[in-house]
Amino acid sequence: MTPTPLLERAHNKIIRCKVVYEGKRLELPSLHLTEIPPEVWELEDLEYLDLSNNQLTHLPRQIGRLTK
């Protein structure tokens, strides 16, 4: 497990958040996100992404980059 600083956005009401990225799984539930952090698209081996209980209103086109 590698802690990864992903979020430092005031507009998402999160100033700093250490996120644990375990291999192919990333969990970002209940963080009041209004958009998916752009760092997510850099995770080439990502197979599971949990964005549950956030404030997302749409999925960006980049979601197609997650092909696994």
Image: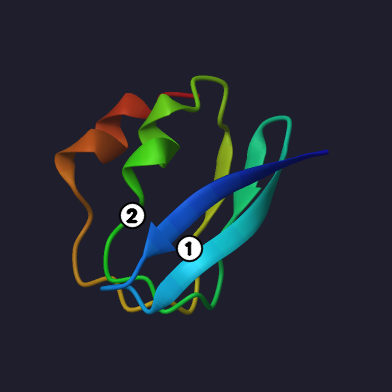
- Rendering quarter of residue 39: top left
Residue 23 horizontal/vertical position (percent): 73, 30
Q: For the residues carrying marks 1 and 2, which lies nearer the camera in this image?
A: 2
Check disc 1: other Cα within 10 Å, few if <14, some if 14-19, many if 20+: some
Picture quarter with the N terminus: top right
Mark 2 residue element: loop
Q: From the viewer's side, name the closer residue of 15 and 58.
A: 15
Q: From the viewer's side, name the closer residue of 46 and 19.
A: 19
Check disc 2: other Cα within 10 Å, few if <14, some if 14-19, many if 20+: some
Mark before the other along the chain sequence, 1 or 2: 2
- Rendering quarter of residue 29: bottom right
* Relative height, residue 16 to residue 66 (above, below): below
Residue 5 horizontal/vertical position (percent): 57, 47
Q: What mark, if any, has residue 36 been given in the picture?
A: 2
Residue 22 horizontal/vertical position (percent): 75, 38
What residue do we see at 16% from left, 39% from top?
Answer: 61
Q: What mark, if any, has residue 51 been given in the picture?
A: 1
Mark 1 residue element: loop
| Label 1 with label 2: CB-CB less than 8 Å | yes
What residue do we see at 50% from left, 27% from top?
Answer: 43
